[in-house]
Image: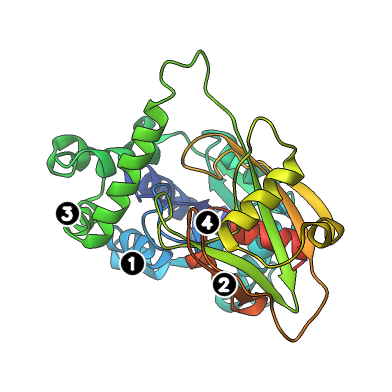
Amino acid sequence: MSNKAYDFLVFIGRFQPFHKGHLAVIEAGLAQAEQIIILCGSAHQPRSTRNPWTAAERESMIRGALSSTNNDRTHIAPLMDIVYNDESWVRNVQTTINGIVTAHHGTPHKTPKVGLIGHGKDQSSYYLNLFPQWGAVNVDNYQGINATPIRESILEQTEFIGSKSAKSVLPENVHQHMEGFCQTDIYQQIKGEQAFVTRYKSAWDSAPYAPTFVTVDAVVVQSGHVLMVERKARPGKGLLALPGGFIDHSEKLVDGCLRELREETRLKVPAPVLKGSIKSQQVFDDPYRSARGRTITHAFYIELAPNKALPKVKGGDDAKHALWVPLADLDPTQIFEDHYFIIQEMTGM
């Protein structure tokens, strides 16, 4: 009979990248549970300076750091963010965990004991309080290791990955993965994004306080299609985005939204019709929604009357192309920042 306190412990994280602190949590979990379930957050998103590695790559990093015995006791699944709907995110976690537990619990007539494992390093670990039906195991932060400075060093300092500092915080297999990753075109693209963001932020170094930017975005829907643009420049070059941009000091939010919409899409719909088609507006203010800094956007949901012929559009200003995309065809891995979640929230997808 097992003397483990739990049948399953659940470890939720982004693992960008996976480091020795994460490995210490897994080892602590396996010491207290028969099996551990690891959910890789921020899955199904485009590569970015905050999320350079895919869920599949992170799973490979994790499994490569574990022994074969511990791999047999470990289950890993991707977990998509639902930035503006905690209830949907919690439901996704519950559904994923329940499915894994049901499939791998070896004692049918015994209710499995499930718990969460992690440490309250910052507000990103608030999830530890969202599942009162499960137990909780708190662990100390291993040697104060944090993924953010590691990730920034990899993207900003070419020599970092060959340093003793890198080897001291990354498992050997992860360090090898990073050496290979740094030779790829993908790395160069993300490194370029990081350099852009660094230059962008440096322009505000002399400000007396960190700036907060205000933007507007247009969620224009007609006949099951949403109007998108392909970004022409960094950040997010080549990704699809909502038409939008920074507000001018002399204009109202709605006027700024319609101006950006026209500049980027050349949408052939009269302004009075657009204004009359606004169904709702909403503020989106996730602190991490933009790599450029604290950016609060005001989104306007514009629902045009159904028509077999979608209005003609053409990319302009910051947009390389403008296009209508069927809602069912939206791919979150190809959409800029949190725009997929804005569409999801405002259209009820």
Question: Is the image coloured rainbow, by chain, by secondary structure, or in one colour?
Answer: rainbow
Q: If you read the primary sequence from the N terminus, does the residue marked by circle 4 or circle 2 appear first?
A: 4
In the displayed structure, 293 sits above or below 173; it is: above
- Crowding at dot 2, Cα within 10 Å, few <14 / some 14-19 / many 20+, comes out as some
For residue 162, side relative to residue 322 (left or right): left
* Residue 183 image position (x, y, % from top left): 16, 58
Q: Which of marks 3 and 1 is in front?
A: 3
Which label was assigned to residue 179? 3
For residue 240, side relative to residue 313 (left or right): left
- Please tell me whether mark 4 sits on a helix, a strand or a loop: loop
Closer-to-camera residue (114/248): 248
For residue 158, side relative to residue 235 (left or right): left
Which label was assigned to residue 3? 4
* Residue 128 image position (x, y, % from top left): 63, 44
Q: If you read the primary sequence from the N terminus, does the residue marked by circle 1 or circle 4 appear first?
A: 4
Q: Quadrant of residue 178?
A: bottom left
Q: Nearer the viewer, mark 3 or mark 4?
A: 3
Q: Do the residues labelled 3 and 2 touch (CB within 8 Å)?
A: no
For the question of whether residue 169 can be seen, the reply is no
Q: How far apart are marks 3 and 2 (CA)?
A: 39 Å
- Crowding at dot 3, Cα within 10 Å, few <14 / some 14-19 / many 20+, comes out as some
**Amino acid carrying mark 1 in the image:** Thr
Q: If you read the primary sequence from the N terminus, does the residue marked by circle 3 or circle 4 appear first?
A: 4
Identify the residue shown where x is 42% and y is 49%.
Answer: 235
- Please tell me whether mark 1 sits on a helix, a strand or a loop: helix
Q: If you read the primary sequence from the N terminus, does the residue marked by circle 3 or circle 1 appear first?
A: 1
Q: Which of marks 2 and 1 is in front?
A: 2
Q: Name the residue under label 2.
A: 323
Q: Mark 1 points at which residue?
A: 69
